[in-house]
Amino acid sequence: MRASAAALEAGYRRMPAGAWQRPVRWTRGQERPVCRAADARRCEVLVHHVDLDAGFTPAQ
């Protein structure tokens, strides 16, 4: 998990300012601006925290 987070951070740091609105295709086929990837990653991590009973609940 740490390596994955570090790789994502490194990629974000290399992103040119003008590229944040470029569309990318999500795994289910929908297109979103690349700036939404951070939100998607956060949601994914929080869902797994709930799955792992790591002190989070779905209500949070």
Image (cartoon, helix red, strand yellow):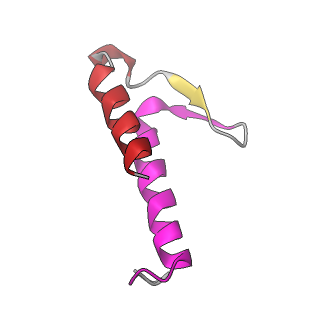
Residue for point 37% across, 50% down: 2
Residue 34 position (above or below residue 44): above
**Where, by quadrant of the figure, is residue 30 drawn?**
top right
Counting the numbered discs, the total is 0
User: Viewed as shown, does residue 10 lie left or right of 31?
Assistant: left
Magenta stretch: give its range: 30-55
Find the residue positioned furthest to the front: 3
Q: Is residue 59 magenta?
A: no
Q: Is residue 37 above or below residue 60?
A: above
Query: Which of the 4 image quadrants contains residue 5?
Result: top left
Question: Horizontal and vertical percent for residue 42?
Answer: 41, 55
Residue drawn at the location 39% of the way across and 35% of the way down: 7
Magenta residues: mostly which secondary structure? helix
Give how far across and how far down residue 29 sits, in percent.
Answer: 72, 36
Q: Is residue 57 above or below residue 1?
A: below
Looking at this view, is 46 or 3 the one in front? 3
Quarter of the image with the C terminus is: bottom left
Left or right side of 30 for 57? left
Residue at figure coordinates x 52%, y 68% from the top left:
48
- Measuring from the top left, give residue 34's x and y in whole percent: 46, 31
- Between 33 and 44, which is closer to the camera in this rendering? 44
Residue drawn 56% across the image and 76% down it: 51
**Residue 35: horizontal and vertical position, in percent?**
40, 34
- Residue 57, by quadrant, is bottom left
- State yes or no: residue 35 in magenta: yes
